[in-house]
Amino acid sequence: MDSDETRAGAAARDELRRKLSSAPANWLRGAIDNPELGPAEVLLLLRNSAAPSDLLERIGKDRRLTSHQEVRSGLARHARTPPSISRNLLSHLYWKDWIDIAAAPAANPVIRRQAEQMLLTRLARLSLGERIALARRATRGLIPGFMDQTHPRVVRALLENPRLAELDVVSLAGNVETGPEALECIAMHSNWGARRSVRLELIVRTELPAQTGLRLAHQLDPRDQRVLVEDDRVPLVVRVWIERRLGKNPRARDDSDGAGEWG
């Protein structure tokens, strides 16, 4: 045992806590046998990216330490934890731990994907409040699972997720299970409701409140309006309004070059 290991093995608890999150591998190997090392100290060690795989494996096999949920979560999330240990730990964690792991850039990609898969499998069994919380933090791998989660509060939370893409919102707007209140949430959103592709998907939905449909139609370019007025999927009240608007703006009907002021 080298001098670093020897000193770490005899270090006082205060010294352990100061050094565990940044110490080199040899010092950590000595610290693991220190009688002052408990679950709180192990959590500090798990913040250390230099922690070697053999040491993490040893922690993973220590039932005294892995009986603590936070240790299990931190160990599964560490990039150097052997995958066999992390996979075993995942089944003993909660959904909140799985999303922490799935969203952790430093975690093993294989373990991140497995955490996502476990969340997707569990999604339908989560309570409404849990689905709302998860929608706000869902990773790219989880977002497809939310395309069928059409409760208005879940949709509202999902729209605030920074990982959400425009194609996801278009898909959600076009889902026949997405009801009036959820469609209204999308249409009124300051970011997604302003996207042309989202507006075009929303405006053909008969479930969308008529006043919202008319507002969207007013915001569309006349070139899009000319297409929609011929689309039987668009609610009649909206098509009639578009037809009247185009009739009042003769230049809007001239699509020879698409140029000019549309009025």
Image (cartoon, helix red, strand yellow):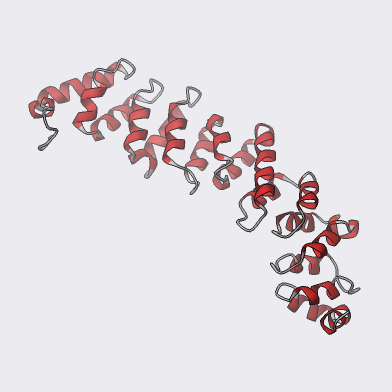
Q: Is residue 228 left or right of residue 247?
A: right
Please state which of residues 237 and 43 is positioned toward the viewer in this rendering. 43
Does residue 58 lie above or below 23 as drawn?
above
- Tell me the residue at 62%/55% (across/down): 104
Q: Quadrant of residue 259?
A: top left
Residue 77 is left or right of residue 158, and the answer is right
- Taking the image as shown, residue 74 lies to the left or right of residue 240, namely right
Task: Evaluate whether residue 126 shows in this view.
Answer: no
Q: Position of residue 252 (x, y in %)?
A: 12, 29
Residue 27 is drawn in which quadrant?
A: bottom right
Percent position (x, y) of residue 17? 77, 75
Count the numbered circles shown: 0
Is 231 placed above or below 127 here? above
Q: Residue at x 29, y 32 (%)?
A: 216
Residue located at (38% from left, 35% from top) = 187
Position in image of residue 76 (x %, y %) = 74, 54
Nearer the observer, 113 or 172: 113
Q: Quadrant of the N terminus?
A: bottom right
Q: Could you say where residue 169 lies in the image, as x and y percent from the top left?
A: 44, 36
**Picture layout, residue 161 above or below residue 106:** above
- Residue 211 appears in the figure: yes
The residue closer to the viewer here, 254 or 209, is 254
Quarter of the C terminus within the rendering: top left
